[in-house]
Image (cartoon, rainbow, N blue to C red):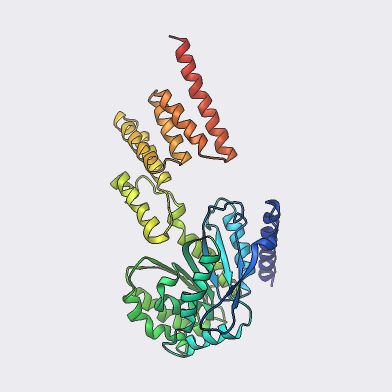
Amino acid sequence: MLKQFVFGITLLLAVTLFAAHSQAQGIDPQQLNTSLDVSSSLSDKPLSFNVTLPPSYFDNPDKRYVVMFDFHPRSQAYLNGMHDWMSHNGDWPWLETIIVTAPDGDKTLGDWKGLAIEERGDTKLLDFMEQALLPAIDTQYRTNGFRIMNGFTGNAGLGLYTLINRPELFNAYFVASPVLSKDFAYVIKDAPKKLAAMKGKPRFLFMSTSDSSFEERQLASFAEMEAIIRTSASSTLDYHIKRFDGTYYMTQPILATAYGIELLFNDYHQVLKADSEISRLGPQAILDHYKYLSEEKYGFEVPATDSLIALAEAEIANGSPEGAEKALAIYLLAVEHYPTSHTAQDALASAYADAEELELAIKHEQLALDNTDHPFWRNKYSERLKKYQASVGGRSSNL
């Protein structure tokens, strides 16, 4: 009972923080919570979906966003609260996301879900998502093409159903405590062949469950599905399977979402260590890796800047003239590929300063300053710029 009470208070605080954060930015929370009416040839009336936009949506008109979709109407509150907390610190660890949830009690949508579960080969639900829902979201909002499907129990089963039948609809699938028994959506019967045949761009799956009394009757089918994934999935599927044994049933979707987000965006946030397998192959290998992430996994740019800087710093740490030369070459490469990166310009400026090329240090420190509005970095770069300028002045006065 105490755990449930603490969890309830935590969720309430997360939702409250979302509203407070929006108000602090001068945004009416009602502007961020809206609805999207989706028309389809499959239905005689539009279906209205709930949409929550990130707090930065109206402040950054050039920014495009990830989309998360969940069939459960009540997931909107906890997803919004978790997202606001996990994204407000510079998109870390959750990239800012547009969250879309299904209408409550819509008969048409309920009928399509029922047919997907009961009638093998019925595609009305998938057709609606592909032909109407997802295009409507992309048309109405500034999306970046990366989509996550989130689900719990029956909706998690439908997530797996979507993954094996139309994997291209979403880039990532979070499925918590999926219902799979009694031929649910024929997932287990269809999965071996369809997972093996999966091609195209990488897809991500996080599948989880626990040993709570509510999930006991699904554990056998969960184990069967896990075995199918491990033996049949093609290399296209990046899968992660976890048991949260000892935790409460109603906590499962929160745990799955948090773990899924961290795993999904880990290679976006984590800097490659200089002794990593990729970095040991050199700066071009790092660029190739981030090109793969940008063009294949995510579909939007994932900069290699920090990993290039980490490799250069390791070269400098060697303490040899050759290491300093290699580091300077890496910094130049970083600036060549990311000329508007303030961190790359600053790193190059420092390298030039160490080489006593102060005019070049001043040039690139000024570029670092020009490419950021963040008070912390502006203050730091301004101090460095003054230092370099003073050094030039001091050198001139000694001539």
In the displayed orientation, state which residue is furthest to the top: 399
| Residue 314 appears in the rendering | no
Residue drawn at the location 66% of the way across and 67% of the way down: 7
Most foreground residue, 171 or 311: 171
Answer with the quarter of the image where residue 356 lies. top left
The count of marks equals 0
Q: Taking 35 as reference, is 270 left or right? A: left
The N terminus sits in image quarter? bottom right
Residue drawn at the location 69% of the way across and 60% of the way down: 29
Q: How far across and how far down the image is residue 4, in percent?
A: 67, 71
Q: Taking 164 as reference, is 81 left or right? A: right
Q: Taking 327 as reference, is 218 left or right? A: right
Q: How far across and how far down the image is residue 144, in percent?
A: 48, 60
Answer with the quarter of the image where residue 363 lies. top left
Q: How far across and how far down the image is residue 209, in percent?
A: 50, 75
**Relative to 145, is 197 above or below?**
below
Q: How far across and how far down the image is residue 252, in percent?
A: 56, 72
The C terminus sits in image quarter? top left
**Relative to 329, is 296 above or below?**
below
Residue drawn at the location 42% of the way across and 60% of the way down: 298
Most foreground residue, 236 or 227: 236
Q: Taking 359 as reference, is 100 left or right? A: right
Most foreground residue, 277 or 308: 308
**Relative to 218, is 279 above or below?**
above
